[in-house]
Image (spheres, rainbow, N blue to C red):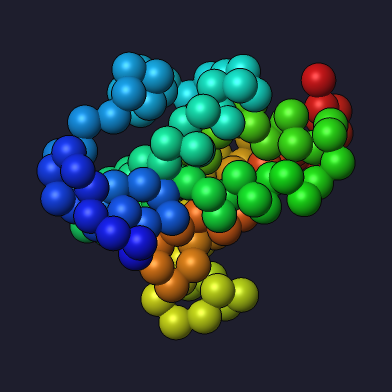
Amino acid sequence: MTGHCPQDGGFIGDAGCTHPNHQHSELVKSLLAAKPRPISPAECEAALREGFYVNTAFNTRVGFGAQLMEHIDHHNPADQRRRKINLLYAVATVKGGKRGRNPKGGPGSFAYARNIDGRGFLVLTDAHGNVEDVFDIIPPGRRRK
């Protein structure tokens, strides 16, 4: 945590303000209300720069922010684009996916998995609840578009 939010006094973390009633930009509000669909890389970048938290069915909150953007930036340009346009699928996975332990992340870290539109998604969080990696899994026999 790096300080307090001037808007509502919440703590500022990796994924922005942690206060559950934080008022986000119109872009983030619209993305959080949208059904899973591809978005533009620019929309993803803006949303992750602002940072946001998503409530899960397990009474936890998962943060999407700087850590995920940093991870995406370590990939080649084609993979970066693919990961960015699929951000809403990762959000939907956290909101309604199955949850298990993330052995890579240590105690208190989780993996969320969900099948959406015939594709599998896996979201890994660290012990602080911030997204550290997102995978999409294409079933065998189907090629990426």
Q: How many marks?
A: 0
- Residue 115 or residue 3, whichever sits in front: 3
Query: In which quadrant is the C terminus drawn?
Result: top right
Query: In which quadrant is the N terminus drawn?
Result: bottom left
- Residue 107 or residue 120, whichever sits in front: 107
In the rendered view, would you say 82 is above or below 5? Answer: above
The spot of residue 38 in percent (x, y) is: 59, 20
In the rendered view, would you say 32 is above or below 80? Answer: above
Left or right: residue 39 versus residue 22 is right
Q: Quarter of the image holding residue 54?
A: top left
Left or right: residue 59 versus residue 25 is left
Q: Quarter of the image holding residue 139?
A: top right
The spot of residue 90 in percent (x, y) is: 52, 40
Outermost residue toward the bottom in this view = 107
The spot of residue 89 in percent (x, y) is: 52, 33
Please indicate, yes or no, whether residue 116 appears anywhere in the rendered image.
Answer: no
The spot of residue 84 in percent (x, y) is: 64, 32
